[in-house]
Image (spheres, rainbow, N blue to C red):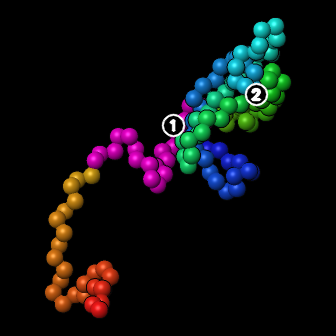
Amino acid sequence: MFVRSTGLGRTLLTGRISKIVTTTLVPATLEEPPAGQTEPTRVLMEMEITNPVHWTVRAFLDPKDLRHMVMLIVTNPTFMMRALKFLFSRGPRYDTPAGHEAPSAPKPAAPAAPQAPAPGAPPKGPPPLPKR
C-alpha cells in the first residue's frame, strides 16, 4: 500500500494493513473504557508503515464511515466491476527501496582482491602531506 499525506509534503510512505477488528477501545487512549462508561463499537484498522519510517497508524471507523464506503461501492457499477477485477488480479512487484534489503536476498560474494594500479597512472586519493 502507498500512503500520501498533505502534512508530509511529497513523501511517499509504503506499508500494509496489519489488522482489522471490531473493538470498544477509546480512540484517545487505546484502552478499554473506564468502569461505568460505555464506548460504541468501532472498526479498528491498523496499518504498519514500513518505509521511510516505521509507524503504526490506527484508524477507527464509525458505522457511518463504513456505511458510506459500502454505499460508494454498491451504487457505482463501474467501480464494482473494477474492484472485482482488482480483487482477482496479481499484485505488481515493486523494487526494494534504497537502504532496505529483501529478506531472501542472497549474501554478496567476498570482495575481489584489489588490483594494482596501472603503471604511470596517477595515484588515487589525496596527495601526501607536505613536510615541514
Residue count near mark 1 (Cα–Cα under 10 Å), binned few <14, some 14–19, many ≥20: few
Location of mark 1 (residue)? 90
Q: Quadrant of residue 127?
A: bottom left
Front-lying residue, 17 or 125 = 125
Amino acid, disc 1: Arg
Front-lying residue, 59 or 37 = 37
Residue 69: image location, x then y, percent: 77, 29
Front-lying residue, 23 or 64 = 23
Amino acid, disc 2: Ala
Q: CA distance from mark 2 to mark 1?
A: 38 Å
Residue count near mark 2 (Cα–Cα under 10 Å), binned few <14, some 14–19, many ≥20: few
Q: Residue furthest top?
A: 36
Q: Is residue 101 magenta?
A: yes
**Does residue 71 appear in the picture of this structure?**
no
Dominant SS in magenta: loop
The circle on residue 4 is: none
Q: Quadrant of residue 77?
A: top right
Foreground mark, 2 or 1?
Answer: 2
Q: Quadrant of residue 33?
A: top right
Front-lying residue, 101 or 79 = 101
**Does residue 118 appear in the picture of this structure?**
yes
Q: Name which residue lies at 60% across and 39% down.
A: 55
Q: Quadrant of the N terminus?
A: top right
| In the image, residue 22 above or below residue 4 | above
The stretch in magenta equals 85-107
70 on left or right of 58: right
Q: Quadrant of the C terminus?
A: bottom left
81 on left or right of 117: right
Secondary structure under tag 2 reads loop
Location of mark 2 (residue)? 28
